[in-house]
Image (cartoon, rainbow, N blue to C red):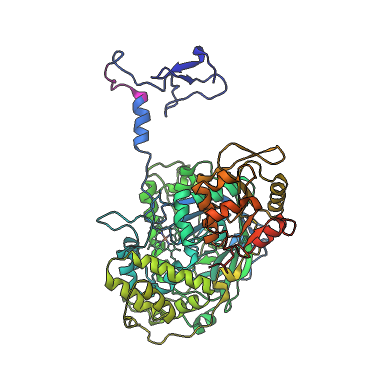
């Protein structure tokens, strides 16, 4: 800023404000009129009242007053980014969808990740399902796959969706709790809705507290159809598999991350894309036919069931790369409008009653949120292919059709506007649909416990333990005893040990009777390894973050070796120290500090190094935040590397005598490379 009064105006405190003239554009009103003074309203006299005629003040305040739009009724908290989808090979044998015809074809994409229950400002690490909504701007229109990071859902019929959401969100009288299901209403509804039991197992697992959006799977959930040029259809389920593998945090970490960095997930994605480390997923298809559907143990139209990968393997058909952050959060992330009914030629819905209800719901919500039927004119929602129709007018119409014809049929020849195209247009699959009109639930939807058990027995003991603790935590917040007991009565239909563990945590004695089941016999399904996160570890530390806690005089050679090892692995490294600014190393050089120790707790890192220098180690060891850093890293079963100078700190943190094989001393025997190799296991689960 120039300290030159000819190029500035004075604010109330006499401070100087920059004016146009040195390259900045001129500030204007919404009508484009240049503004001379953006600091003061128009007054009658020096100390007089503000005048009604102040159109500049009115212009500014009016717009501000209207800045908010209703947040999404669910999935309010989200984060969107741009990318592309690339098709591997032509899928023309099963679908005529344009984006799957040509190998290497790239289709622009916008993806919004979200939590479900919390409001827009809620923390990222709530125990919750994550939304995984993908908009593909194909050459034949927009296709939205509005999925989640969990492949099943709570309910089977859209009729129950408002009840589910009401029960999950804050209670209507008190207005809390925010962004959590640990309350009476949720568990009351769940315990009266046995169809939710498979989903309950998933949300009580580590899937509901992912480490990052980059490390989670996505699922289309429902069975859809793919149709080829001959009109032949197959069923298909959509899976997004993260190239970086799956990873979750521990519940205690989630609680602490929510305090330390409530934007942990959005920041992670923002930072990754901005440093060019583009997250990638493979789109996988489970393709099956009517014959398989007929003999499968469950109804493929039931969204509370998966089809295990062991029964129908997943075929990778393309990759999704996220490579560009938004220019503006509101314009893109907030205004993006996903609708399950946005499908393209070659893709079709199934008769899943949940999907059918969703197809009805999303348009309404977008009109409510975005204020009118023209939300497809907003750039993030606009197709990137020609759009020609006779729909017109309405609020905020940006481009009405040109010309005389705004109806069809018409006899205006070439000036008559667009025409239908039976050969290329969307055609629904000719699935026969005959039957009496009736409000029913098919008997084929009745088995609520078999897959819940399958999920549970597919987990490692560590994961099973996390699930039991999650149930114990959630239900400990439920005040009404009969609700807690009712949940345990369902758990008894899933796994006795699990039910007993949870009952013990809640001091429920004696155990209640098992819940009455709509289908009394539970099927004994085999365990499915693909359902466990730990059994499918990434075997790499790529994309993860190392937190190096340092003090003045830290070993420069070791630090450089850690930097190199991280770089080679594709991991990040951050320096945490007692002070911000720069830190002097043993060789006299300085390194930039990323976080002051109380702003960079170890929950923000995947593994930690304790690298104090001789000079600063005593002072560091006395800082409570440094002690917590060490204690938490240890309790959260992280890999820890340390040097001799960290002995005092480790003693004060209470771990000095508890060191195990997950704690590696950096010396001539163990190099920085060895440590990063160990970190590829992500956690030292053996530490209890
Ligand atoms: Fe939904 C948003 C995913 C069932 C009604 N849903 C929404 C979003 C995702 C999902 C990811 C956020 C999209 C975004 O980022 O803007 N919803 C699902 C999945 C479901 C599901 C995977 C079950 C398989 N949803 C579902 C049902 C209904 C809705 C049964 C209603 C009958 N969902 C909505 C909605 C939302 C929404 C009210 C709120 C905001 C929005 O649509 O744009 O229409």
Answer yes or no: is residue 206 visible: yes
Ligand 1 placement by image quarter: bottom left
Q: State the image coordinates of residue 653 (x, y, percent, origin top left).
A: 52, 55
Q: In the image, 96: left or right of 12? A: right
Q: Residue at x 42, y 26 (%)?
A: 29
Q: Main secondary structure of the magenta part?
A: loop
Q: Is 441 drawn above or below residue 150 in the view shown?
A: below
On screen, 489 above or below 543?
below
Q: Which percent across, then down, holds residue 686?
A: 58, 69
Q: From the viewer's perspective, tell me whether residue 548 is left or right of residue 504.
A: right
- Residue 655 at what x, y percent from top left? 55, 59
Q: Is residue 413 visible?
A: no
* Magenta part of the chain: 48-56
Relative to the observer, which residue lies in front, 110 or 384? 110
Q: Residue 685 versus residue 55: which sits nearer the camera?
A: 685
Q: Quadrant of residue 473?
A: bottom left
Q: Nearer the viewer, residue 633 or 566?
A: 633
What residue is drawn where x is 43% and y is 61%?
128
Q: Is residue 218 magenta?
A: no
Residue 27 image offset from top left, x and y in percent: 47, 25
Residue 52: in magenta span:
yes
Q: Residue at x 41, y 76 (%)?
A: 501
């Amino acid at each position: 800023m120039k300290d030159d009064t000819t190029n500035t105006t004075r604010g109330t405190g006499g401070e100087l404000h920059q004016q146009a003239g040195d390259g900045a554009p001129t500030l204007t009103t919404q009508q484009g009129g240049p503004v001379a003074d953006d600091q003061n309203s128009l007054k009658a006299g020096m100390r007089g009242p503000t005048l009604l005629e102040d159109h500049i003040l009115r212009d500014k305040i009016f717009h501000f007053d209207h800045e908010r739009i209703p947040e999404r009724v669910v999935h309010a908290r989200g984060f969107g980014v741009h990318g592309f989808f690339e098709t591997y090979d032509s899928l023309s044998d099963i679908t005529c969808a344009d984006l799957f015809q040509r190998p290497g074809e790239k289709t622009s994409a916008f993806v919004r990740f979200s939590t479900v229950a919390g409001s827009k400002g809620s923390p990222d690490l709530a125990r919750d399902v994550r939304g995984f909504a993908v908009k593909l701007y194909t050459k034949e229109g927009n296709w939205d796959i509005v999925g989640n990071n969990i492949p099943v859902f709570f309910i089977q019929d859209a009729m129950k969706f408002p009840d589910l959401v009401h029960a999950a969100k804050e209670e209507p009288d008190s207005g809390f709790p925010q962004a959590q299901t640990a309350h009476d209403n949720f568990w009351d509804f769940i315990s009266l809705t046995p169809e939710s039991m498979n989903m309950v197992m998933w949300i009580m697992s580590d899937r509901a507290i992912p480490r990052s959006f980059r490390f989670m799977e996505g699922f289309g959930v429902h069975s859809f159809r793919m149709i080829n040029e001959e009109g032949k259809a197959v069923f298909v389920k959509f899976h997004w598999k993260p190239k970086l593998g799956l990873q979750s945090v521990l519940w205690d970490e989630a609680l602490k991350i929510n305090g330390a960095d409530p934007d942990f997930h959005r920041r992670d994605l923002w930072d990754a894309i901005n440093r060019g480390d583009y997250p990638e997923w493979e789109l996988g298809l489970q393709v099956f036919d009517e014959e398989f559907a007929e003999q499968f143990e469950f109804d493929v139209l039931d969204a509370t069931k998966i089809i295990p990968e062991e029964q129908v393997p997943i075929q990778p058909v393309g990759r999704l790369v996220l490579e560009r952050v938004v220019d503006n959060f509101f314009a893109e992330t907030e205004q993006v409008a996903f609708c399950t009914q946005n499908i393209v030629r070659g893709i079709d819905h199934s008769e899943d009653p949940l999907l059918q209800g969703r197809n009805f719901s999303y348009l309404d919500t977008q009109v409510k949120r975005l204020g009118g039927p023209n939300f497809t004119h907003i750039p993030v929602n606009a197709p990137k292919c020609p759009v020609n129709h006779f729909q017109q007018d309405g609020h905020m119409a940006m481009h009405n059709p040109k010309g005389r014809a705004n109806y069809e049929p018409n006899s205006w020849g070439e000036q008559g506007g667009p025409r239908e195209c039976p050969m290329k247009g969307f055609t629904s699959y000719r699935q026969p649909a005959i039957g009496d009109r009736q409000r029913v639930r098919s008997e084929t939807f009745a088995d609520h416990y078999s897959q819940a058990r399958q999920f549970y027995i597919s987990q490692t003991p560590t994961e099973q333990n996390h699930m039991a603790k999650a149930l114990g935590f959630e239900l400990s917040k439920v005040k009404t005893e009969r609700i807690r007991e009712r949940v345990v009565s369902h758990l008894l239909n899933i796994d006795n040990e699990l039910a007993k563990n949870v009952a013990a945590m809640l001091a429920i004695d004696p155990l209640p009777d098992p819940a009455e089941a709509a289908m009394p016999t539970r099927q004994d399904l085999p365990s499915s390894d693909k359902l466990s996160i730990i059994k499918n570890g990434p075997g790499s530390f790529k994309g993860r973050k190392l937190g190096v806690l340092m003090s003045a005089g830290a070993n420069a050679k070791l630090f450089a070796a850690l930097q190199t090892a991280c770089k080679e692995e594709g991991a990040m490294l951050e320096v945490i120290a007692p002070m911000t600014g720069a830190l002097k190393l043993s060789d006299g050089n300085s390194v930039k500090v990323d976080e002051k120790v109380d702003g960079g707790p170890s929950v923000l890192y995947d593994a930690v190094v304790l690298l104090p220098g001789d000079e600063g180690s005593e002072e560091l060891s006395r800082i409570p935040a440094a002690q917590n850093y060490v204690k938490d890293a240890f309790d959260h079963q992280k890999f820890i590397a340390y040097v001799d100078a960290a002995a005092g700190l480790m003693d004060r943190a209470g771990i000095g005598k508890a060191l195990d094989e997950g704690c590696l001393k950096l010396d001539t025997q163990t190099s920085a490379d060895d440590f990063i190799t160990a970190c590829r296991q992500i956690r030292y689960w053996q530490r209890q």
